[in-house]
Image (cartoon, rainbow, N blue to C red):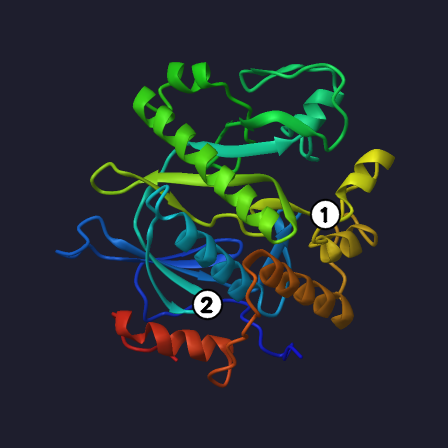
Amino acid sequence: MLDLSRVLPHARIPELPHPYFGKVRDCYDLPPSPEHPGGRRILISSDRISAFDRILAAIPFKGQVLTQTARHWFDHTADICPNHVLGYPDPNVVIGQHVSILPVEIVVRGYLAGTTSTSVLTLYRAGQREMYGHRLPDGLRDNQALPQPLITPTSKAFDGGHDAPLTADEILAQGLLTPDQWEAISAYALALFDRGQKMAAARGLILADTKYEFGLDAEGRILIADEIHTPDSSRYWRAEGYAEAFETGARPPSFDKDVVRAWVAARCNPYTDPIPEIPAEIIAQTAQVYVEAYEMITGQPFQPDNAGPTPLDRVRANLSPWFTTPSKA
């Protein structure tokens, strides 16, 4: 049984330098050193769950699940593409090389799926056949496998704006990437996706699509950063049941991580109204979904780390070697 009192709602640690607090991650930049002239970043995955451009709740062990799922995939794809990882001092924490994230978000899609305005399914339903520089044939059905996996890049809206679809020609014409960078990233993305689909299939899963973040290190080398093939960055379906769902036009069976999102949306306008208190059973159900996703994706039992009085105490203790200022506690 999970101890649902073990929650990491934040990782605000004043002894760590140069903080940056995102919606889900709390990050700290370490200064350059002779071994790491480009600097390093501490990335702490909290248990916060974000939707509708706001924080809805904290889900016990969510941060550990995402960090350890990404670790599984970084370990199994390092032969394909170098990554930013330098170490894991805590189950919720990655020490990574500081990278300059490239201004193009890479999504690889193996199926005609999705719900956002930039998804291939949304565009296809609207009658488009030319998208992202690709031509799709007529007659495809919802959630059907594409003739081959497609890279569907979008502009990366760092300033809070909306991502916009791009083609390879537009990426090069706008100077977002050099031709060599685009060629390398395309090859990396397709190879990573191929590895992900094959490993997922062995676990009874379909990796339908996924998002990759690439960046440059201090020497200009392309690295994959952020996360890879996690339940939050990828669409997974259960292979068992997919064929029946496809034939009937139903949604393929998946990890339903939208438990909290759906509960909130059914009770208010989540963009403008106050968020009602989310029941403990909904929090527990969502935590279990994340744990189940970890175990199915990795094939390993989930081992919750219950060290320390609280998860924050444990994280603080494990990061104490990087403290640079006296405690303000």
Kindly state the secondary structure of the residue where label 2 is placed. Answer: loop
Residue lying farthest left? 34
Horizontal arrangement in the rendering, residue 19 relative to residue 289 (left or right): left
- Report whether residue 235 is seen: yes
Residue 140 versus residue 156 in the image, above or below: above
Identify the residue at horizontal 46%, vertical 40% (top origin). Answer: 192
Question: Disc 2 to disc 1, how far (Cα)?
Answer: 27 Å
Amino acid type of the residue that numbered disc 1 sits on in the rendered structure: Thr
Q: Secondary structure at mark 1?
A: loop
Q: Is residue 274 visible?
A: no
Where 70 falls versus 180 (above or below)?
Answer: below
Task: Please say if 179 is above or below 289.
Answer: above
Q: Quadrant of residue 329?
A: bottom left
Identify the residue at image location x=50%, y=38%: 194
| Residue 103 point in image, percent of width and height | 41, 32
In the image: residue 176, left or right of residue 308 = left
Q: Residue at x 64, y 30 (%)?
A: 119
Q: Nearer the viewer, residue 156 or 71?
A: 71
- The residue beneath circle 2 is 11
Residue lying farthest bottom?
309
- Mark carried by residue 272: 1
Viewed as shown, does residue 147 lie left or right of 211?
A: right
